[in-house]
Image: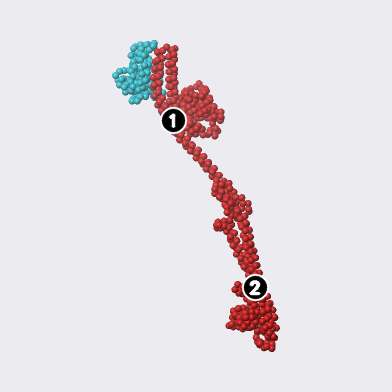
Amino acid sequence: MKKVLVIDDEAIVRTSCERALTPEGYEVKAVSSGKEGVELLQKESFALVLLDLKMPDMDGIEVLNKINETWPDTKVVMITGYSTVETAVQALRLGAYNFIEKPFTPDTLLAAVTEVFEKTNQGGAEDRDIKRDSGNP
Amino acid sequence: MRNLFNFRNPEKSIATKLIIAIGLLISIVSLIFWYAILQKQKMDVMSIAVKYGGSFVNFTKESIHHSLLTSQRDETQRVLETLATPEGVRRVRIYDHKGKILFCSHKKSVGQIIDKATVACKGCHVDPGKSSELLQNPQRWSVYRENSGPTLLKIVGPIPNEPDCYTASCHVHSREQGILGFVEADVSLALLDEAVFKQGLALTAYVIVFVFAVSAFLGIIIYKIVSRPVSELVDGMAQVAGGNLDASVSIKSGDEMGVLAQTFNSMIRDLKAARDQREKWTQTLEAEVAKKTEEIQRTHANLMQTEKLASLGRMAAGVAHEINNPLTGVVTFAHLLKKRFPSDSTEAEDLNVIIEQAERCSKIIKNLLTFARATPSEKGKVSINDVLSRTIFMVQNQEKFHHIKFNINLEDYQFIILGDPSQFQQIFLNMFINAADAMNGRGNIFVSTRKTTESGKPYVEIEFTDEGCGIKEEDMPKLFEPFFTTKPVGKGTGLGLSVSHGIVKHLGGHIKVKSVVGKGTTFFVRLPLAEEAR
């Protein structure tokens, strides 16, 4: 199972990610703050975290640093508004895998997510099966 | 005209004063002459009267000479009575050296002693009755008046001793006696009095007429040369005091009054010139103050506007960022929904419209964010063509540009410049807004880019041409001054070109302007290309 964690303070963004990825065979869990995300990561492992840059309690960069330190195998894709593109670039330097701009389409999101799983060889055969499935919707 | 002769208040009128003074002088002089002439006449008349009186006395002496020698007393008395008449000779009498009346035309007074205080004795003696001393210049006549009667001349003539007298047979007089007696006549001067009185009246009438004539003549002269000019001057001054500086005094005489009037007129002219000058200064000053006040107000309004724009920009950035989240929802769910319908169905087409419009929203927001400068900016590589296209896209969605056609001709080259994209966008946006304002929102805007070199270095030249009203020659030097604007207050800040110029200069470029009033304006923005991009 390809597990994806969405951390975004906006409910509609979380829902959008869930609705776009679940039919494609991803197991999506979503939380509304960086703190909750870190707590959940401590309980179970995720292959990918979709992380919003701007959040009220814990900044996206902070959460990214924490994930890089604690769970180096977990990839992070930043979700950003246009005004924070420069910050997103900074995030890439800090070790984020990629970033997508809001507002994104389901295809953009899926492409970014698929890329992560394809290129990093995550999850072995099980992952590959999924990939085959997703390639034939 | 004012009162020329103010007789009620003589101290208020020069003419009246002069006339009174001169009239008084003439009256006094005339009075002295009048009196002197009258006295002279009286004296002349009197001397004639005395002469005739003396003749009469001599005549009387001759008349009685014989009767006295022959001692015919009755005859002597009769002669005297005959000589006396009521109108002419009032009384004639003879008395001896002791004062005893021997004969008289009034027979009753014969034998009486005459009063020694009268001219009978005082005519010759210094002190009659006390000594026989004689006067050096005897005056043997006097004038007197009895009650209210006419003036009378009393004249005395001595009867000297003669050989016939002291040799006569009667032996009344001795040889030693000097004077035997006196003839005294009282002559009435009534006719002379009347003549003198009539002459006096005539003289008085003449003097009065003279005084009045001279006074009237002087009055006219004074009126002509003093009162009227003075009155005109007073009128002129009153008009000037009332604010009428066009007044003038028309006295053409060459005397002091004329000089005074000319001086007055030239003074008024100077005054008027000074007043006009002062009014001009005042107007200039007022205009200057109004201009400065307007400038201050405009600056203030501009600052307010700048402040407003800045906060509006911050707010817009915040709002735009927030809108991205719901927009993500719209786009995602539209896509999800679209997947449930066949791709050629009406529903799929409708959903495509939703997706397109949501993406358009997203683009607008991106441009707005760039403009709002809330974007944390870092100097980076900026593609001029990209920023230009994005800016044009953004303004095309603005109401202001709905009736403006953009003619875009960008050279196919990656013009890379190191800078902040939002700053370039600001410059371009400003050019478009100025162009739209100059064309009143209708017409063509031509935008082109081309590669060029300056001093051997590569530059990009961005040309913005409008079909607007153009820029006046006199406004050209002020074009890049902060707060200089030709737009109505509240519409333009006067900061656009100034800020653009600042940014361009900072990047090592420059802005050139070509303009024809009524035809349009072209701005050439030249920027040096980044070294890496060469």
Q: Are marks 2 and 1 on the same chain?
A: yes
Q: Position of residue B214 (x, y in %)?
A: 63, 60
> Which of the chains is red?
B
Front-lying residue, A131 or B121: B121
Q: Is residue B149 above or below residue B358?
A: below
In the displayed structure, does residue B495 sit left or right of residue B115?
A: left
In the displayed structure, does residue A6 sit left or right of residue B10?
A: left
Q: Which residue is mark 1?
A: B309
Q: Which residue is mark 2?
A: B189
Q: Is residue B167 above or below residue B29?
A: below
Instruction: Look at the numbered disc 1 and give the secondary structure of its residue.
Output: helix
Q: Which mark, by number, is residue B488? A: none
Q: Nearer the viewer, mark 2 or mark 1?
A: 2
Disc 1: host chain: B
User: Which residue lies at the image location 43% right of the left edge and 31% below the top edge?
Assistant: B308
User: Which residue lies at the image location 45% right of the left edge and 35% below the top edge?
Assistant: B300
Mark 1 burial class by Cα count in 10 Å: few <14, some 14-19, many 20+: some
Front-lying residue, B1 or B52: B52
Q: Position of residue B450 (x, y in %)?
A: 52, 24
Mark 2 burial class by Cα count in 10 Å: few <14, some 14-19, many 20+: many
